[in-house]
Image (cartoon, rainbow, N blue to C red):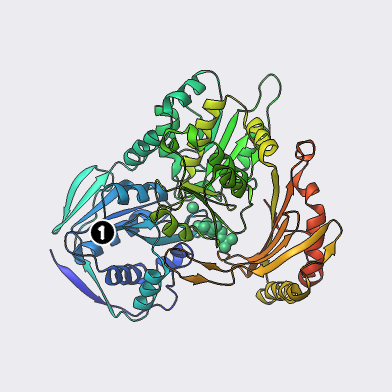
């Protein structure tokens, strides 16, 4: 096999973000752009002889072409074997599973998560290490540094492989094995959850709807929910992965999963809405949980999963601990306290959970940004959360709303909402943050109506495992009754700056727990506005998105 060495010029913008390198498809199609980045990865990871890698993506536009290029470059880099999901498909949690199950050196996942796809949409690539999790910053920094200095890439001269034909293929000395993208993942789910109990629940007339949003979870949900758990055909909607996600925005929230929301909030007495609804994002790591006419906040979902974890066979021996990102509500902390296990508060970003899971300190992790997961893999996992809820529902035989209401009655309710101000000019957003920070010296002890400030700080985190320090992770203002306001700038926005305001109030009284969150949080919303001079500084009357 011929290996060509191609002279190239470095690109200056290949710095991986929160979740790998994400750019427009048009950028990835610039000659040499993908090749340069992939070469920088191979040069950095320096995989030893005999190494196996995993390769797959969420099926978005450009997935197949990119896989052919990466395979030829892997062969040129001396990789011994690559496991590729059939059709180029692997959800992010499934890729994590495959890396771990087969003890692979690492893997490349092609996705831009919940960002829209298609020729005008986004594409992305990220490297995961042998623990199945996203590469830590010291590796992504090294990849970036390498991308800025390389002058050549190496690529094998070979025809395209048939990605749809399962089994072993040769590419020079390298073996490419096309694997079933679903089997290893489904096997893991079956080992964690009580499939027999869920089958019985579904057989009893319990109705559910899973919206795959024309993204990667379609084949996974059809196999697991319809084939293995016996839900009727059609339970999974938008189940065929499309290169442009059907023109949609594959983000499972109340705004973008509008078809599912209409189903779950619709119906009448004669034909009621399903008992349970859920959706996942482009690459299958996010989730949204709904009951009939009921939305479960991601923060509550984490707490409820933790409180009921012992119902699932994979967690029957108990959990080691819980971790949540700082802006996620403290509902999980209350559960951890009752269980007598630690609860860690980390900066936003799934990568901060990796060390805690590897060290066995935590079993469950969650973020307010629709991410929940556990140490079964090293990514957040949308379908896992759905199956956990189904396991809890099968055991309790209560409705989703009843489960949540009982949880609140037992632990108190952390009433929660996030207000996003998107596409602000960067200096305006920075001004709001500076204004809040400027108040810190005199805030403690001050009273705002019923609320007295207990503390305020700029959140920083020292990783208890490797001692690394992350500063400037969000401005927290805590009140004496446990309520909280957090100001934070998004790290994932693409246009200007996105300011996120996280609001949380604690309501111990069951008689007052069922009020609407915006209503219950109104006093805190007013305090946030007053402290930050939000309206004057942004000229905005209301948030762009409320979750
Ligand atoms: C990605 C990460 C998450 C993070 C989320 C929100 O989805 O994987 O871990 O919580 O982005 O980030 P942002 O900085 O936009 O609030
Ligand atoms: Zn995702």
Residue closest to the eye, 500 or 373: 373
Position of 200 relative to 391 (above/below): above
Left or right side of 196 for 487: right
Quadrant location of residue 290? top right
Q: Return the residue found at the far right.
A: 449
Residue at 58%, 65% (x, y): give it: 493
Residue closest to the eye, 95 or 326: 326
Residue 58 can be seen, yes or no: no
Residue 524 can be seen, yes or no: yes
Quadrant location of residue 409? top right
Return the x and y of residue 515 as percentages of the image width and height. 78, 41
Image quadrant containing the N terminus:
bottom left
Residue at 62%, 44% (x, y): give it: 300
Residue closest to the eye, 119 or 54: 54
Residue closest to the eye, 287 or 496: 287
Residue at 18%, 58% (x, y): give it: 80
Instruction: Report if the beta carbon of the residue with label 1 is closer than 8 angstroms to ligand 2.
Output: no
The residue under label 1 is 71
Return the x and y of residue 450 as percentages of the image width and height. 85, 56
Quadrant location of residue 67? bottom left
Position of 2 relative to 214 (above/below): below
Return the x and y of residue 224 as percentages of the image width and height. 41, 33
Return the x and y of residue 246 as percentages of the image width and height. 51, 46
Circle 1 packing at 10 Å, graded few (<14), some (14-19), many (20+), is many
Question: SS class of the residue under badge 1?
Answer: helix
């Amino acid at each position: 096999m011929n290996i060509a060495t191609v002279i190239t010029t470095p690109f200056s913008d290949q710095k991986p973000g929160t979740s790998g390198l994400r750019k427009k498809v048009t950028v990835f199609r610039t000659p040499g752009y993908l090749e340069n980045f992939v070469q920088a990865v191979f040069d950095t990871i320096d995989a030893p002889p005999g190494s196996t890698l995993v390769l797959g993506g969420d099926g978005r536009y450009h997935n197949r072409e990119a896989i052919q290029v990466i395979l030829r470059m892997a062969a040129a880099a001396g990789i011994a074997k690559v496991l590729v999901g059939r059709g180029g498909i692997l959800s992010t949690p499934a890729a994590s599973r495959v890396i771990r199950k087969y003890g692979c050196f690492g893997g490349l996942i092609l996705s831009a998560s919940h960002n829209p796809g298609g020729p005008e949409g986004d594409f992305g690539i990220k490297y995961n290490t042998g623990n199945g999790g996203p590469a830590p910053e010291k590796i992504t920094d090294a990849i970036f540094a390498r991308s800025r200095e390389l002058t050549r890439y190496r690529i094998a001269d070979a025809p395209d492989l048939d990605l749809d034909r399962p089994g072993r293929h040769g590419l020079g000395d390298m073996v490419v094995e096309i694997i079933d993208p679903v089997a290893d993942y489904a096997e893991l789910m079956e080992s964690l959850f009580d499939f027999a109990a869920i089958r019985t629940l579904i057989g009893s007339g319990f109705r559910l709807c899973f919206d795959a949003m024309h993204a990667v979870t379609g084949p996974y949900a059809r196999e697991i929910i319809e084939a293995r758990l016996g839900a009727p055909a059609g339970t999974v909607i938008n189940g065929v992965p499309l290169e442009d996600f059907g023109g949609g925005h594959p983000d499972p929230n109340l705004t973008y999963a509008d078809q599912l929301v209409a189903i779950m909030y619709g119906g009448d007495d004669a034909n009621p809405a399903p008992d349970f609804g859920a959706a996942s994002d482009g690459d299958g790591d996010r989730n949204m949980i709904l009951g009939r006419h009921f939305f479960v906040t991601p923060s509550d979902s984490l707490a409820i999963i933790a409180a009921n974890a012992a119902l699932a066979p994979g967690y029957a021996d108990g959990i080691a601990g819980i971790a949540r990102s700082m802006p996620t509500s403290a509902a999980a902390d209350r559960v951890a306290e009752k269980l007598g296990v630690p609860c860690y508060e980390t900066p936003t970003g799934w990568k901060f959970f990796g060390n805690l899971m590897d060290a066995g300190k935590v079993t469950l992790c969650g973020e307010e940004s629709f991410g929940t997961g556990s140490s079964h893999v090293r990514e957040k996992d949308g379908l896992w959360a759905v199956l956990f809820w189904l396991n809890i529902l099968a055991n309790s035989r209560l409705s989703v709303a009843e489960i949540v209401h009982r949880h609140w009655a037992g632990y108190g309710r952390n009433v929660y909402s996030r207000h996003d101000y998107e596409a602000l000019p960067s200096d305006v957003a920075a001004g709001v943050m500076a204004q809040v920070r400027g108040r810190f010296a005199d805030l403690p002890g001050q009273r705002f109506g019923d609320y007295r400030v207990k503390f305020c700080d700029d959140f920083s985190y020292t990783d208890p495992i490797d001692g690394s320090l992350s500063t400037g992770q969000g401005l927290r203002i805590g009140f004496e009754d446990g309520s909280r306001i957090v100001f934070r700038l998004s790290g994932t926005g693409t246009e200007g700056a996105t300011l996120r305001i996280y609001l949380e109030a604690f309501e111990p009284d069951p008689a007052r727990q069922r009020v609407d969150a915006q209503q219950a949080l109104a006093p805190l919303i007013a305090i946030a506005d007053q402290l930050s001079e939000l309206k004057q500084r942004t000229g905005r009357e209301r948030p762009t998105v409320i979750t």
